[in-house]
Image: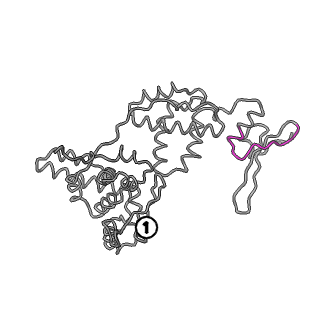
Amino acid sequence: MRPRKTEHHHLPPRMYQRSRKRKNGSTWTAYYYRDLLGKDIPLGKDLDKARIKWAELEAKEKPLDLRTMKGIFDRYIRDVVSKKAPRTQKDNMAEIKQLRPMFDSAPIDSITPATIAGYRDARTAKVRANREIATLSHVFNIAREWGLTTKENPCQGVRKNKETPRDYYANDVVWDAVYMKAAQELKDAMDLAYLTGQRPADVLVMRKDDAEGGYLGVQQNKTHKKLRIQMTTDGKANSLGRLIAEITERNARHVSNYLIVSQHGKRMTATMLRKRWDIAREKAKLAAIEIGDDLLAAKIGGFQFRDIRPKAASEIIDVGEASLLLGHTKGDITERVYRRIGAIAKPSK
């Protein structure tokens, strides 16, 4: 038998790699198994799947790194997490980091629902545990698609920790207290977030050219849901239309096409927004303490920029309209999570 080529040394015995350049400049690669008669059997273009097929042909166990969760986590990060939105990538990486100490060395087929329940009960951060188990569940589903296990997903049917949705509502007194201490660019961000009902990340990427034909076009980063929010009512600019016109006029001297920019014309980042928010909130809190209103100070201290979205949802009378603005496909999510004030009722007499 001829000695194996150097580029094949990372492959198991009798497994070979073929590559060739395509006309478009990309490289085509596929893997083959050469049997004792010298016949080449195609193993496909995915190295991990090819190694599994090789193990079947050799009547051997799957390679250890494809049976333990460490290798599966590594591949999930490489092939799945890397294709998600930046914020989701960050969350998934944090969740997998928490999962690794318990699961890295475990063979995938050894994990049972009792194992998952044990992890859930051992975690002190109960809400985070739910998110971590949800990520682990997706890892199992993908591993099944990859052919790394044929077992049922052990996360299915495992109870989640009880969660209480955030119930903070920023009334107008709290809003005005922070708004009065805010820099102009933060005021613009607050107004835009309230009138559009969008998440902070979506507000920060809104551009002047998103406003067209009487609508503000929005594509939500988290769900990829597309919306067109009206900027006119009966042919006249409504509150959103007037706000965008004011922001555009105020920022006319800046080159940036984004609506929310700093006083120097730099696009506002999440970090810049958070710093300005913390400064304005702290000033408002101190002002409330100075007048002896500790309850208001405490309420201001709990106000987060993300509470603007549920404030908008709570103050729209029609839950259907609120759900549409927030981009929810089901109204019960809007009602259960984002509506934070009670329904309007008439007195008995």
| Left or right of 216 on screen, residue 312 | left
Give the quarter of the image for residue 6: top right
- Asked if 92 appears above or below 227 in the picture, the reply is above
301 w.r.t. 211: above or below: above
Residue 22, percent from left and from top: 74, 59
Q: Which residues are magenta?
A: 37-51
Q: Which x, y percent locates residue 128?
A: 41, 37
Q: Residue furthest right?
A: 37
Q: Secondary structure at mark 1?
A: helix
**Three-letter amino acid code at the position of disc 1:** Asp
Identify the residue position indicated by label 1 in the image. 210
Sort mark 1 into few (<14), some (14-19) or many (20+) by Cα contacts within 10 Å.
some
Q: Is residue 82 above or below residue 151?
A: below
Q: Position of residue 299 (x, y in %)?
A: 22, 46
Residue at the limit of the structure toward the left, as seen here? 291
Residue 316 or residue 166, whichever sits in front: 316
Q: Which quadrant holds residue 326? A: bottom left
Query: Is residue 69 toward the left or the right of residue 267 in the image?
Result: right
Position of 82 with respect to 345 (left or right) is: right
